Image (cartoon, helix red, strand yellow):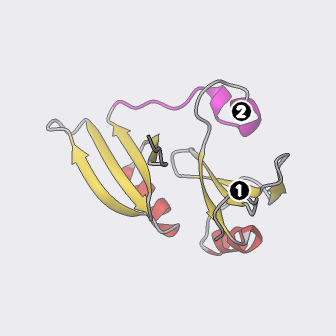
Amino acid sequence: MRFIPHHVAITVTDLDEAFQFYKIFGFTVANHWTSPDGDIDIVHMQLEQYLLEIFRYADGHPAPEAMQQLATDLPTVGTKHHGVRVSDVDAAHDWVQSMGLQPESAVNEGKTGVRYFFIRDPSGNFFEVAEDFRPFLQPM
């Protein structure tokens, strides 16, 4: 049995804002389903073989306060964020700012040796941009 990464799912408040944000990073809409009553949208945005599954509910509600800051969200059990890998995280940080977006953090080096920064999408979901050259990963 072989398992390969497939997708991460997030919920957003505004699909158009989500589309515009993730398109900046190279994601394209691969599939879009809307319920007959218009109360639910499910969209798959694709970046190479990575799928981002986006839910939009008409009656959606904001995340609890504890999930709105990395420092208080990370200790809470559950999915935290999704991310992409780049070959130069400093250049990516500069590029994100040149696109008019505001990173949530400076470039940091994590305890596992990965250099990264976070940005939030328009609905507040954390999105990580990471530079990771560890030997067990396929070269970029």
Distance Cα–Cα, label 1 vs label 2: 25 Å
Q: 10 Å neighbourhood of mark 1: few (<14), some, or many (≥20)?
A: few
Amino acid type, label 2: Leu
Please tell me which residue is depicted at 48% across the width and 48% down the height of the picture: 4
In this view, 100 is above or below 14: below
Q: Which residue matches tag 1?
A: 136
Q: Which residue matches tag 2?
A: 74
Determine the residue located farthest toward the front in the rendered image: 1
Left or right: where does residue 31 sit relative to residue 7? left
Q: Quadrant of the C terminus?
A: bottom right
User: Percent x, y for residue 15?
Assistant: 37, 51
* Magenta-colored span: 59-72
User: Percent x, y for residue 136?
Assistant: 71, 56
The quadrant holding residue 103 is: bottom right
Amino acid type, label 1: Phe
Q: Nearer the viewer, residue 80 or 138?
A: 138
Please tell me which residue is depicted at 80% across the width and 60% down the height of the picture: 107
User: Percent x, y for residue 110?
Assistant: 82, 49
Helix, strand or loop at label 2? It is: loop
